Amino acid sequence: MKPFLLTLFLATLPLLFGIWVNATSPPPTRAYVATRCTRYCAAHGCRHATRANSPAYFRLRPLYAATVRGLMLGGRARYADVNVAVYLGFIPGLLMWLTYGVLRDAARIRQLKSHL
């Protein structure tokens, strides 16, 4: 039972961080804003990013484009549904399952070591 509770505790940390970010950030907009990135940047490419201030942006942009194409495999109308299913369902579920497995196996290894 201990690995399960620890897994739930660890799973709440990103949730709490997400709540904090959403509570303290400005409201989302699709319009271009010169002083900060908005959803406009995600959809049209970021004008704020340069190779000098955001080298990772340019290295990861092909991965981002491939991810969007993958999420659109169900069609444009299903993009939002697939996005939610993957990022709020599948990936967190997979990470919780893997975390639980690691914690459970660590507890088993400790038990086996104590019996030696």
Image (cartoon, grey):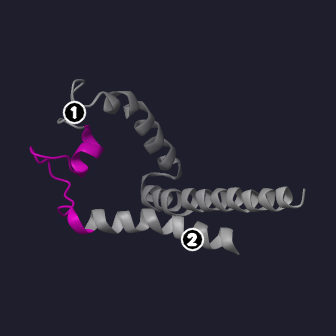
Q: Which mark is residue 8?
A: 2
Q: Which mark is residue 90?
A: none
Quadrant of residue 50 in the image?
Answer: top left
Task: Please determine whether, in this image, residue 62 is positioned above or below residue 99.
Answer: above
* Mark nearer the N terminus (2 vs 1): 2
The residues tagged by marks 2 and 1 sit, at their Cα atoms, a distance apart of 37 Å
Magenta residues?
23-45
Q: Residues within 10 Å of mark 2 (few under 14, many from 20)?
A: few
For this view, does 19 lie left or right of residue 85?
left
Q: What residue sits 44% from the left and 55% below the top?
A: 79
Labels 2 & 1 near each other (Cβ < 8 A)? no
Disc 1 target residue? 49
Q: What residue sits 22% from the left and 24% below the top?
A: 52
Depth order, front residue of 59/82: 59
Q: Mark 2 is on which residue type?
A: Leu
Q: Residues within 10 Å of mark 1 (few under 14, many from 20)?
A: some
For this view, does 84 lie left or right of residue 51?
right
Q: What residue sits 29% from the left and 62% below the top?
A: 21
Depth order, front residue of 52/43: 52
Rendering coords of residue 58 (x, y %): 33, 28
Rendering coords of residue 114 (x, y %): 83, 60
